[in-house]
Image (cartoon, rainbow, N blue to C red):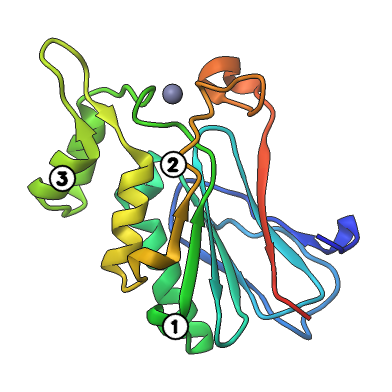
Amino acid sequence: MGVARAALRLIRQVHGTDVAVARRGDSTTWDPPLADIILSDDPGVAIGVRVADCAPVLIADRRLGIVGAAHAGWRGTAQGVAGVAVSALGREFGSQPGDLVAAIGPCLGPCCGEVGDEVPQAFLDHGHSAADIERWFRRLPGRRPHFDLWRANRDQLEAAGVLGANIYSADLCTKTHPMTFHSYRVDGPNAGRMVGVIRKKG
Ligand SMILES: [Zn+2]
């Protein structure tokens, strides 16, 4: 990313929707805050989220150059973290959703996203519509629901006003490609992490 390791701004992720901002002109030291979204207008730093099956969602404003990164596992996605990131870009920097481009990186795919019934229930509890939940959870007879993290994040970005043509999803499943990606489902709690990183152009 063209910055020193010390200029990589990460956050202490807790599967929520709190927002950290690495602002231009801020101190050069960084005590990682509890957050699952990080935004920046500072070309001197790169910002990122760590993942292993959760989705890294990277966002850039083509007009203002502002960037953001969100950590979206199923808990964060139930809370609408991608849409919260879009709103936060507007609130903090005046971004308009129509100027945003977004990328959803490798994460658990619908092929391997088997979950318990408490997961779709959590989406219902957070107010998502039955139609959305039906689209995001594949149900085959006699099998547990399979969550489509790719689709859910794409839909939530679009619902927040990002144009569908401006959303890129890698559509690569971390569990299906364990030689290429770190996967919590494959390696357990000691799984390595990947970092989805983005930086404002200078
Ligand atoms: Zn898979």
Q: Which mark is residue 105?
A: none
Q: Nearer the viewer, mark 3 or mark 1?
A: 1
Residue positioned 38% across, 43% down in the render: 150
Q: Residue furthest right?
A: 4
Q: Position of residue 29 (x, y in %)?
A: 84, 68
Judge from the rendering whether residue 157 lies leftward or rightward of residue 123; answer left or right. Answer: right
Q: Quadrant of residue 117?
A: top left
Q: Is mark 3 within 8 Å of ligand 1?
A: no
Quadrant in which the N terminus appears: bottom right
Task: Name the residue carrying label 2.
Answer: 73
Question: Alpha carbon of mark 3 to alpha carbon of mark 1: how far?
Answer: 27 Å
Tell me: residue 63, above or below residue 100: below
Local SS, label 3: helix
> Disc 3 marks which residue?
124
Q: Upstream in the sequence, badge 1 or badge 2?
A: 2
Front residue of this view, candidates 59 and 92: 59
Q: Which mark is residue 90?
A: 1
Q: Amino acid at mark 3?
A: Leu
Label 2 or label 3, whichever comes before in sequence order: 2
Callouts 2 and 3 close, C-beta under 8 Å? no
